[in-house]
Amino acid sequence: MAVPLAFFGLFFAYPVAAIVGRGLRTDTGWQFGRIGEVVTRPDIADVLWFTTWQAVASTALTLVLALPAAYVFARLDFPGRQVLRAVVTVPFVLPTVVVGSAFLALVGRGGLLDELWGVRLDTTVWAILLAHVFFNYAVVVRTVGGLWAQLDPRQEEAARVLGAGRFAAWRRVTLPALAPAVGAATLMVFLFTFSSFGVVLILGGPAYATLEVEVYRQTAQLLDLPTAAVLTLVQFAAVGAILALHAWTLRRRERALKLVDPSRTAVRPHGAGQWALLGGVLLTVAVLIVAPLAVLVERSFDAPGGYGLAFYRALQDAAATGTFVVAPLEAVGNSLQYALAATAIALAIGGLAAAALARRAGPFLRGFDALLMLPLGVSAVTVGFGFLITLDEPPLDLRTSWILVPLAQALVGVPFVVRTMLPVLRAVDERLREAAAVLGAPPLRVWREVDLPLVRRAVLIAAGFAFAVSLGEFGATVFIARADRPTLPVAVARLLGRAGELNYGQAMALSTILMLVCAVSLLLLERLRSDKTSGEF
């Protein structure tokens, strides 16, 4: 636990505390009275209420639509399953500003729905909710589906042989086993939607604002640091309470599980019910996932002179025209380097934390578990500003170092590593470890021979999540990435922030490149995971 605690204390707690201190402390002392003044304002109360209920609605809608897909990817074997799994994960890597722009082109003025049926959903809460489902669909599919694929289906079959119906067997046998993974996915989706920024900013218009949007407005537009600091504290307290409740209930739902080779649990669909479920999931993916992505690709080729590669050619010429310090295409290499470093850091920190949480229990561990999830619910704007004002002098003068970006990205990747690995580690039967120890194996060999074969699949899933999150992280990276080494999301945001059809088209082209990089990386990971997990159990 020492290494994860030191990492989060130095690169998360310290920068956030510094920002809050600058906002609430003056030459005359701490101004704690500002907290009561801000939280009792009617406009802030409206922001708090909207932030909460839209996060609850977004999470519920995501679970309803994504849990059937988790079953389909875990239990059914059909052509193109690995490709479709990668496609489903692509939205999660996209910067939220790109997600908002894609939905705006789909449901906004002049969008596809407007052209076909005269339907507009922009500036409505439905556009926000659907964009949140689009963004978080993969969290449920991969987190829940990863554990579901390793559950022994013979336990549910035994319950049915003893007289239980299909639904009763699933509710009494499979659902309790999946509860930790479902809880982890629910928590992550809620935290992402609770702190939603780019999606609400673009699709919600002036009528809707989350805490994250309000923090940005108070900081960047009104320069009201005290109000922004109070809102950060409110967000911090709300997220902390949610994490504490989750940690308290989690231990009540966990138990040892019998895990099997996932390649043995997936079967060809049979029966009208399974075929109907597969068709429904494929239709949902086509409408909710593929359609917005297709809009991005179509806009990237729709140049003024007709469909072609004009916007892609302009990306390479942007540096020569003075639009960028370097060509935006160089951001591809920067993003891959940053993402690989961030993934390595996230796996090391998250793996150590998951191992500690899996072996011990108690109030301190529940607090430690909650600490690991806080970066998902605390303003990325706050973290980015905090890095700039705290890590700028010896012995931690990192503001000009390339490692600063992977450190910020790893803060968001660690929670996914922990939440993906922890249910599997806690599901390992402790008697297996005890038997190995009785036979003379030291602790390190017990971990290598018992835990690692069972958790290797979860490690690869966690690596995929961490890599995808690092590729798409924008909120903190935009403040700390150097002008000569931008990431793909930062380059996209710079293009979207400039007026003109050429800049918008280049942004769509660069977003398409980002999608392709993500899809290829995830496909390689899927193949590696299949090779590593075949024939080991």
Image: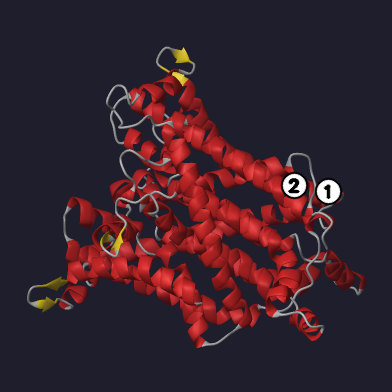
Q: Is residue 57 left or right of residue 526?
A: left
Q: In the rendered image, which quarter contains the C terminus?
A: bottom right
10 Å crowding of disc 1: few (<14), some (14-19), many (20+): some
| Residue underneath mark 1 | 269
Q: Is residue 367 above or below residue 111?
A: below
- Residue closest to the far right: 161
Q: Nearer the viewer, residue 187 or 2?
A: 2
* Circle number at residue 110: none
Q: Residue 218: which quarter of the image?
A: bottom left
- Residue closest to the far top: 305
Q: Is residue 505 left or right of residue 413?
A: left
Q: Can residue 201 be seen in this view?
A: yes
Q: Is residue 133 left or right of residue 216?
A: right
- Residue closest to the far left: 28
The residue type indicated by label 1 comes to: Pro
| Residue underneath mark 2 | 278
Q: Nearer the viewer, residue 312 or 331?
A: 331
Q: Residue 317: which quarter of the image?
A: top left
Q: Which of 320 and 165 is in front in this view?
A: 320
Residue at 74% in and 81% down: 430
- Which mark sits nearer the N-terminus, 1 or 2? 1
Q: Where is residue 152 in the image (x, y as percent from the top left)?
A: 82, 66
Q: Is residue 118 visible?
A: no
Q: Position of residue 488 (x, y in %)?
A: 43, 39
Asked if labels 2 and 1 touch by Cβ distance under 8 angstroms, the answer is yes
